[in-house]
Image: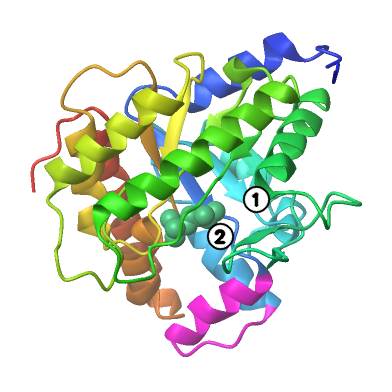
Amino acid sequence: MVVRAGAYDDELVKTAKTIASPGRGILAMDESNATCGKRLDSIGLENTEANRQAFRTLLVSVPGLGNHISGAILFEETLYQSTVDGKKIVDILVEQGIVPGIKVDKGLVPLTGSNDESWCQGLDGLASREAAWGLARYAAISQDNGLVPIVEPEILLDGEHGIERTFEVAQKVWAETFYQMAQNNVMFEGILLKPSMVTPGAECKDRATPEQVADYTLKLLSRRVPPAVPGIMFLSGGQSEVEATLNLNAMNQGPNPWHVSFSYARALQNTCLKTWGGRPENVKAAQEALLLRAKANSLAQLGKYTS
Ligand code: 13P
């Protein structure tokens, strides 16, 4: 039996509720240096600290961002990073009313003996354990240290499989994740879930409408996620910006027991990044592009987005 200290319970619940507040979601900007390098490469920029700093400065200093964004997930480098004007990035987020978070894992490694699954490094002695158990230990350790864990059982979009197959796999993965969290005495009121939506594989010929994605995903949530969990913050997983907004909007057409929202990286940042292109004269237009996506997803969280 795992016993939790519980010293931070009130704070955890408060933080999780603040992040899961109406009309707001998470800006995922926790790209590792390697992933950030790929994004910068797509606009012809070198992966230098100065370029990473310039892009992150642009993201966090969008005026009014906090009206739509409640939390930001940072990579370790950003936790200590300053903006180009020398202000701490974390301080800017707090001034914007955005809760800063930190990616605590040490990257993905292949899971031995699995069907091409990966799991996160960062917990010692876990080589022979399952990914779900690792997620649960991460959640328990975070809570014991006063951090709200964002639990991310991601099922990749890659493949030709249909939506039914994604649903089937997700049911298994989520069942195991919640079972292991219960075993590890994780307080469900003090976590946020960051899953992928139930969609067909990226190469599947049968595309799904936002209503179909919403039906499958909400069915999965109702079967697997206790209402005690305050927020479901979906990742975008390679969906287009508009697709990610429409799918979220479709899920918020009726009342849900949880705050159903977003924790998008690519679906918030793609146009912003392209518009910027590494040029100082484009910063304002790029910030407007981010704000446009943030506003659209904010409306989608309320079920009020119209394209
Ligand atoms: P995407 O929204 O680009 O899938 O990224 C989310 C994420 O996992 C980053 O933390």
The residue positioned 59% from the left and 88% from the top of the image is 46
The residue positioned 77% from the left and 59% from the top of the image is 106
Residue at mark 2: 57
The answer to whether residue 50 is above or below residue 292 is: below
Q: Is residue 282 left or right of residue 245?
A: right
Q: Amino acid at mark 1?
A: Ile
Discs 2, 1 touching: Cβ within 8 Å: yes
Based on the picture, tell me whether residue 206 belongs to the magenta stretch.
no
- Residue 207: x and y in percent read 15, 61
Distance between the alpha carbons at the discs numbered 2 and 1? 7 Å
The answer to whether residue 163 is above or below residue 40 is: above
Q: Is residue 156 left or right of residue 133?
A: left
**Nearer to the camera, 76 or 173:** 173
Please give the range of residues in magenta: 33-48
Dot 2 alpha-carbon crowd within 10 angstroms: few under 14, some 14 to 19, many 20 or more: many
Please identify the residue farthest to the front as the structure is shown.
113
Image quadrant containing the N terminus: top right
Residue 300 visible in the current orientation? yes
Residue 99 visible in the current orientation? no
Q: Is residue 307 left or right of residue 189?
A: left
- Residue 155: x and y in percent read 46, 55
Q: Amino acid at mark 2?
A: Thr
| Label 1 beta carbon less than 8 Å to ligand 1 | no
* Count of marks overlaid on the render: 2
- Residue 138: x and y in percent read 75, 39
Residue at mark 1: 89
- 2 or 1: tag closer to the N-terminus: 2
Dot 1 alpha-carbon crowd within 10 angstroms: few under 14, some 14 to 19, many 20 or more: many
